[in-house]
Image (cartoon, helix red, strand yellow):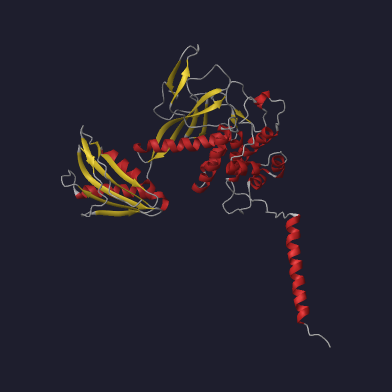
């Protein structure tokens, strides 16, 4: 859709108890004395609006925004208000992968001067170019199913995992909560919501890999529940409310240390009533934090598929199996041969013994991945009601699924340790006998034809 003037009438609060109309000024041809471009390099164009919000917040100003988002170009209007009066009008547009073009002007009855407006935008642009941030404390909460998180664990001096004050003590395994206390580099206070959400997304992916649990953002919404005595039902909201949250970063030692276990420690040696984590978790977090932006995105993409595989392991085992194959294949180097698949990634990261264990199962990983994702073929028991009542069951799919469940997080961890620096195995062309015969027969026929043609051209003796 091409850029066009809005036909809607939009009104917003003016900050003084009244309402004001937001005009679509993108097509105004008048004088715009302030004009500049924000480059896309170093993500300057992406974060410019966050610095605009911070500068307005510092001055006690408010913003009213209107935007049209399209694939080719985004554009919009921003009205800045102070003391209930409109002060500055801004028009912006950005073509796909192009710079952010900004035009601005004072309204006719503005209380600020032109020099004040110019200083306002100079401050925004300088801070955006230098990526100026302030460290701010935030707390977020994630959920998982398993043993209770009962202590604290410092991943570094700015990141702490902490137990909630309430626990479900009715079962060893159950719905669990872990708080994330972190000091984040924010573009001022208005940036806290964005920074917290990004931190929670990355932390949930990282913890899902190292804990081998589906650590997720909170489910939201309202659901039907029934009372403990089972006499009635009611609709209630999902969520966990902490009675008291800290206002600043807690000091180390506020809670007891979360138990750590060695990589070779058997499950029976770990605590029964609380979660323990692998002893090298802080080193893995350091490895993650040292990744480049491109490498971090690749890891998060693969970890997201692993998260989804764990979420659906019980109700959609075929999908879970296919997603684990996708997670492994997502770790492939960008310059790898296109013929490399998840088998090659597993071999490169974990060795030939690991990939041989995967290959020996009755359900080939690549086959399950392709047939389920491309044609919806079901390989597990998800469509079989009362499967335990069947006279004959084939356990081979569950066996193959368990093997992939062991291999996938191990590959993700090894990729993280190597920081995406590893050699893929050489691609071996495996030609079938039929193809070999077809190619060689064609060569033989072509050679025979050429010989016959040459014989025909030779002079004949009388």
Where is residue 49, by image quadrant?
Answer: top left
Q: Is residue 305 above or below residue 249?
A: below
Residue 449 point in image, percent of width and height = 75, 72
Please indicate whether residue 124 sits to the left or right of residue 85 in the image: right
For the point 83% across and 87% down, the residue is 461
Where is residue 285, by image quadrant?
Answer: top right
For the point 53% across and 39% down, the residue is 304
Which sits in the foreground, 417 or 338? Answer: 338
Please indicate whether residue 347 sits to the left or right of residue 316 in the image: right
Residue 416 visible (yes or no): no
* Residue at the extreme bottom: 462
Which sits in the foreground, 3 or 95? Answer: 3
Residue 462 point in image, percent of width and height = 84, 88
Residue 349 point in image, percent of width and height = 64, 45
* Residue at the extreme front: 462
For the point 20% across and 42% down, the residue is 86
For the point 31% across and 41% down, the residue is 53
Residue 191 visible (yes or no): yes
């Amino acid at each position: 859709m091409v850029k066009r003037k809005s036909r809607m009438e939009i009104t917003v609060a003016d900050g003084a108890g009244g309402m004001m109309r937001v005009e679509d000024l993108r097509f105004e041809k008048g004088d715009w004395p302030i004009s500049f471009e924000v480059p896309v390099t170093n993500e300057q164009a992406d974060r410019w609006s966050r610095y605009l919000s911070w500068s307005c917040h510092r001055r006690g100003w408010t913003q009213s925004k209107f935007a049209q988002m399209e694939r080719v170009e985004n554009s919009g209007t921003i009205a800045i208000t102070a003391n209930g009066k409109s002060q500055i009008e801004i028009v912006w547009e950005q073509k796909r992968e192009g710079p952010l073009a900004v035009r601005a002007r004072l309204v006719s009855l503005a209380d600020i001067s032109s020099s004040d407006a110019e200083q306002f935008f100079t401050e925004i642009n300088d801070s955006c170019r230098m990526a100026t941030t302030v460290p701010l404390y935030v707390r977020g909460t994630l959920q998982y199913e398993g043993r209770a998180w009962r202590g604290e664990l410092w991943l570094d001096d700015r990141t702490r995992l902490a137990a909630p004050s309430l626990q479900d003590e009715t079962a060893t395994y159950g719905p669990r909560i872990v708080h994330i206390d972190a000091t984040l580099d924010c573009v001022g206070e208005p940036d806290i919501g964005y920074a917290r959400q990004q931190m929670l997304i990355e932390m949930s992916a990282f913890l899902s890999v190292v804990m081998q649990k589906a650590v997720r953002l909170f489910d939201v919404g309202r659901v039907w529940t029934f009372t403990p005595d089972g006499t009635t039902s009611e609709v209630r909201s999902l969520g966990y409310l902490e009675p008291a949250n800290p206002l600043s970063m807690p000091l180390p030692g506020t809670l007891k240390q979360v138990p750590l276990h060695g990589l070779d420690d058997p499950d029976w040696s770990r605590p029964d009533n609380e979660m323990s984590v692998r002893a090298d978790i802080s080193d893995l977090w350091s490895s993650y934090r040292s990744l480049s932006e491109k490498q971090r995105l690749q890891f998060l993409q693969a970890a997201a598929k692993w998260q989804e595989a764990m979420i659906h392991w019980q109700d959609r085992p075929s999908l879970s199996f296919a997603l684990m194959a996708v997670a492994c294949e997502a770790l492939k180097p960008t310059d790898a041969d296109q013929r490399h698949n998840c088998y090659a990634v597993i071999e490169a990261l974990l060795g030939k013994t690991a990939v041989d264990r995967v290959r020996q199962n009755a359900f080939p990983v690549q086959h399950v991945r392709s047939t389920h994702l491309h044609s919806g073929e079901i390989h597990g028991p998800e469509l079989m009601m009362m499967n335990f009542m069947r006279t004959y069951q084939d356990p081979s799919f569950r066996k193959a699924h368990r093997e992939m469940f062991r291999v996938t997080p191990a590959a993700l961890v090894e990729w993280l340790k190597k920081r995406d620096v590893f050699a893929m195995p050489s691609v071996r062309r495996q030609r079938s006998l039929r193809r070999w015969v077809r190619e060689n027969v064609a060569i033989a026929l072509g050679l025979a034809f050429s010989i016959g043609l040459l014989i025909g051209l030779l002079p004949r003796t009388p």
